[in-house]
Image (tube, rainbow, N blue to C red):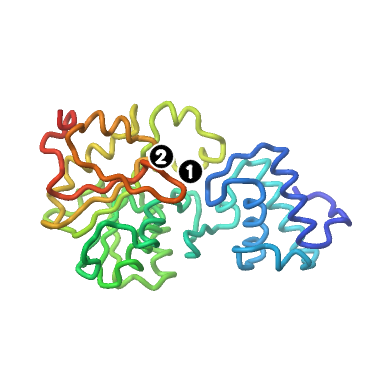
Amino acid sequence: MAGRLKPSLDTLGDLFRFAVRRFKAAKLAYGHGTTNAVDEAAFLLLEGLRLPIHNIDPWLALRPTEAEKARLLTLIDARIALRLPAPYLVGAAYMHGVRFHADKRALIPRSFIGDLLVAGALPIAEPKKVRRVLDLCTGSGCLAVLVALAFPAAKVDAVDLSPGALALARRNIATHRLGDRIALHRGDLFAPLAGQRYDLIISNPPYVDARGMDRLPPEYRHEPRMALAAGRDGLDLVHRILAEGSRHLTRQGALLCELGRGRNPLERAYPRTPFVWLDTELSQGEVFWLEREGFPTMVTKGDR
């Protein structure tokens, strides 16, 4: 894979520039924590050496050992030849500086909900009163961890249908020493939670529509299909969450849900539902907030 080590690749800066050139030439797809070849190369090299990932500049003069260079060249080659997302290659992903284990058992950690949690941007009048939180479709457990950090007084239930994803989530929860506050449940959405009510429900469910699945770049096809595909309009799970969610919310409770580019079909299906759209620096109309009293009363075909 790595081939013969080139004499010119002596420093991390040499390897960095080499990787950027190759990534650009290969026309890779990004979106798993980075958005371009420069940031992707920096992340892959820094995490490959277990260095701080925030800024490569202080490390450009570093001279890796021959073994380290061989490993980094192998990572660069694999990123191109296999079109594997960088987090799967190095086994880690970051959300706002929080490190998570990542592998093919679950979607690579990323969500605009995480941005909102870290920024404290939820329309909650008294955050200290949030005592019970539910994370639906928890995957790697990244949002369960972030919501536990955002609401220190809260207990969190996290649900997923995949045993592999739950095993990965369990590892991430243990890494962040939150096992006493986050409980994992295997099941289909609300199925394992009969009679339970929450102050806040969060969910980053599968939301890619059929056309989007057909057009996914190779990088995204390495992720579990069940974590991405959501039927013709991308709303299969969102419809179900709206159908059942109000029964699992406290009187002042609310749902925070990410649905990618599904805003238009959602609002067509539920024209009288008072969705509040919470935008971030990098997203617009991709995350909605819905209080319990606003949930639709008819859900098989929306509230039409």
Q: Position of residue 195 (x, y in %)?
A: 11, 55
Which quadrant of the view contains residue 213? Answer: top left
Separation (CA) of disc 2 from disc 1:
8 Å
Q: Position of residue 259 (x, y in %)?
A: 35, 41
Residue to which mark 2 is pinned: 228
Task: Specify whether 290 is left or right of 65.
Answer: left
Amino acid at the residue labelled 2: Leu
| Residue name at image x 29 percent, y 55 percent | 135
Q: Nearer the viewer, residue 251 or 100?
A: 251
| Residue name at image x 48 percent, y 50 percent | 108
Task: Specify whether 85 is left or right of 177.
Answer: right
Q: Nearer the viewer, residue 297 or 121?
A: 121
Marks 2/1 in contact by CB < 8 Å: the verdict is yes
Instruction: Please state, as top left, top right, bottom left or bottom right, where the C terminus lies in the image.
Output: top left
- Classed neighbour count for the residue bearing mark 1: other residues with Cα under 10 Å, few (<14), some (14–19), many (≥20): some
Residue to which mark 1 is pinned: 223
Q: Is residue 45 above or below residue 63?
A: above
Q: Is residue 78 above or below residue 234?
A: below
| Residue name at image x 78 percent, y 66 percent | 61
Q: Nearer the viewer, residue 106 or 211?
A: 211
Q: How many marks?
A: 2
Disc 1 is placed on an element classified as loop
Q: Earlier in the sequence, mark 2 or mark 1?
A: 1
- Classed neighbour count for the residue bearing mark 2: other residues with Cα under 10 Å, few (<14), some (14–19), many (≥20): some
Which quadrant of the view contains residue 45? Answer: bottom right
Amino acid at the residue labelled 1: Glu
Disc 2 is placed on an element classified as loop
Q: Position of residue 158 (x, y in %)?
A: 29, 57
Q: Position of residue 264 (x, y in %)?
A: 32, 31
